Image: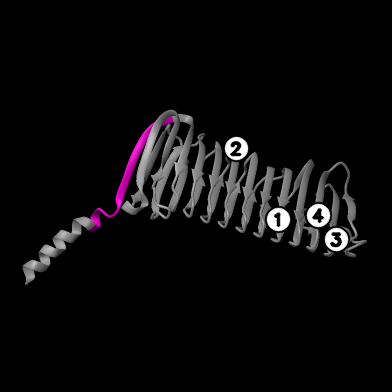
């Protein structure tokens, strides 16, 4: 009986090995190439490097679909394509030139991008999105997935339906919007133009608005917590119709009756900060 068992093992082994297709591919592209990446399920990790080429390693199960990589010079396309409505997950590590423009599409795949200084555009449904570095422009959109940006981009756009949005570093021109998710802006750099908008989710802003810049924060019934440094120069315009306003920046009127707008200035010639909510409570205080 022993030889029969050994034969069965030898027959099954090749099938197990072939279950995962190992990917190791490379093509040459321009330093500022436009690169489109598709991976609906699994994980996509993109890293910028100082080479004029794209290098891909990873694993693609047969049920995930067919791996594709093509293009040269100014444009290239990388991804896993499948006719299945629910393909298996593929795991891809992709190195691209730092100055490339990168467009990434996901469904449930988690997406991580670092080291890219060109434009980044990511769309997902339930997969999480994470970006680190200093891209020129970053656009991230998800339905239920979380968005976590630790960047210093010139332009930042983040949008979800129910996923949480966290922006660290920040600065520049920033727009973040959600329906029921949480928005957290924890900025180490000054905002030039900012708009944070939610319907039911709370919004937290901790940062500085540049002199002459603008910040607008708006919700329907989500709470708003606004923290600025003591030396922030700004004209504040805060309104909630059914909520309350706690104004820790102005000792003369720390708590304001419901429905009454709060308008005050800290210094002169500073930023313009506008806060609007229908039912949410608002707190404005020093950092």
Ranked by sequence position, the earlier of labels 1 and 3 is: 1
Q: Secondary structure at mark 3?
A: loop
Ranked by sequence position, the earlier of labels 2 and 4 is: 2
In the image, is 196 to the left or to the right of 7? right
The answer to the question of whether label 2 and label 1 lie on touching residues, with beta carbons closer than 8 A, is no
Q: How is the image coloured?
A: one colour
Closer to the camera in the image, 197 or 66: 66
Q: Magenta segment, principal secondary structure?
A: strand
Corner quadrant of residue 1:
bottom left
Ranked by sequence position, the earlier of labels 4 and 1 is: 1
Ranked by sequence position, the earlier of labels 3 and 2 is: 2
Residue at 90%, 53% (x, y): give it: 263
Corner quadrant of residue 279:
bottom right
| Mark 4 neighbour density, 10 Å: few (under 14) some (14–19) many (20 or more) | many
Closer to the camera in the image, 159 or 205: 159
Cα separation between marks 3 and 4:
9 Å
Read off the magenta span.
16-29
> Disc 4 designates what residue?
276
In the image, is 28 to the left or to the right of 131? left
Q: Is residue 157 rendered magenta in the image?
A: no
Q: Secondary structure at mark 1?
A: loop
Q: Which mark is residue 198?
A: 1
> Disc 2 designates what residue?
136
Q: Is residue 22 rendered magenta in the image?
A: yes
Task: Name above or below for residue 222 compared with residue 215.
Answer: below
């Amino acid at each position: 009986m022993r030889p029969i068992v050994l034969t069965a093992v030898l027959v099954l082994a090749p099938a197990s090995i072939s279950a995962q297709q190992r990917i190791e591919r490379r093509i040459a592209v321009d330093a500022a190439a436009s690169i489109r990446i598709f991976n609906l399920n699994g994980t996509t990790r993109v890293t910028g490097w100082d080479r004029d080429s794209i290098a891909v390693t990873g694993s693609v199960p047969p049920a995930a679909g067919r791996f594709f990589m093509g293009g040269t010079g100014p444009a290239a396309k990388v991804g896993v394509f499948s006719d299945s409505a629910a393909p298996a997950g593929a795991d891809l590590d992709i190195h691209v030139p730092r100055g490339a423009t990168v467009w990434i599409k996901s469904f449930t795949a988690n997406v991580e991008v670092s080291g890219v200084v060109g434009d980044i555009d990511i769309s997902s449904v339930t997969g999480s999105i994470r970006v680190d570095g200093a891209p020129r422009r970053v656009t991230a959109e998800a339905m239920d997935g979380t968005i976590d940006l630790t960047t210093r981009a010139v332009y930042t756009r983040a949008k979800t339906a129910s996923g949480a949005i966290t922006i660290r570093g920040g600065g520049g021109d920033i727009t973040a919007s959600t329906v029921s998710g949480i928005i957290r802006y924890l900025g180490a750099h000054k905002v030039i133009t900012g708009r944070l908008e939610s319907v039911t989710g709370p919004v937290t802003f901790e940062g500085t608005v540049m002199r002459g810049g603008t910040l607008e924060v708006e919700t329907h019934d989500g709470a708003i917590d606004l923290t600025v440094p003591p030396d922030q120069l700004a004209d504040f315009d805060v309104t909630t119709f059914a909520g309350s306003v706690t104004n820790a920046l102005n000792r003369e009127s720390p708590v304001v009756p419901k429905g009454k707008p709060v308008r005050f200035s800290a210094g002169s010639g500073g930023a313009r900060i506008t806060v609007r909510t229908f039912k949410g409570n608002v707190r404005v205080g020093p950092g």
